[in-house]
Amino acid sequence: MSDMTCPKCHGSMRTYERNGVHIDQCTECRGIFLDRGELEHLISAEAAWQAAPSAPAAPPPPQHSSGHGSSKGGYYKRKKSFFEELFD
């Protein structure tokens, strides 16, 4: 395996394998580079991930009254996208 150089900043590149796709990322500028067909594979994986049924929603947190007749609504963490989970 040869050492790869970033085409943008000429830093060293590191290869990651995520969900069957090899992703090259620059260690300096953090640029992401894909080989032919890898973007299409990622798009297909994202579509399949979005189509998959999500886990049942957690019950809402209990509502607490502030004593003034108003209550604050609960905040829910949004589901991460496939691409966000890909680079965690």
Image: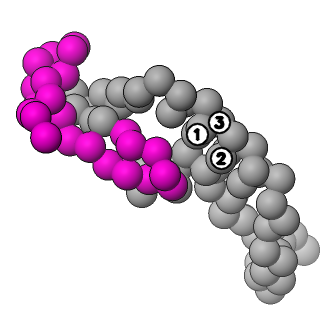
Q: Is residue 39 visible?
A: yes
What's the amino acid at mark 3? Ile
Q: Residue 9 in the image: x percent, y percent?
A: 15, 16
Q: Secondary structure at mark 3?
A: helix
Q: Amino acid at mark 2?
A: Ala
Looking at the picture, does residue 56 appear above or below residue 37?
Answer: below
Q: Position of residue 46 (x, y in %)?
A: 67, 45
Q: CA distance from mark 1 to mark 2?
A: 5 Å
Q: Indicate the quadrant where residue 47 lies.
A: top right
- Residue occupying the point 37% across, 39% down: 23
Mark 3 closeness class: few <14, some 14–19, many ≥20 residues within 10 Å: few
Which quadrant would residue 22 be assigned to in this image?
Answer: top left
Alpha carbon distance from label 3 to label 1: 4 Å
Give the magenta-colored segment's residue range: 1-23
How many numbered badges does the structure rendering display? 3
Q: Disc 3 designates what residue?
A: 43
Element on which disc 1 rests: helix
Can you name the residue that lies furthest to the right here? 69
Q: Are marks 3 and 1 in contact (CB under 8 Å)?
A: yes
Q: What residue is disc 2 on?
A: 45
Residue at 80% across / 60% down in the picture?
52
Q: Quadrant of residue 27?
A: top left
Farthest-out residue, top: 8
Instruction: Quickly name the residue at label 1.
Output: 42
**Residue nearer the viewer, 26 or 79:** 26
Disc 1 crowd rating (10 Å Cα; few below 14, some 14-19, many 20+) is some
Q: Which label was assigned to residue 6?
A: none
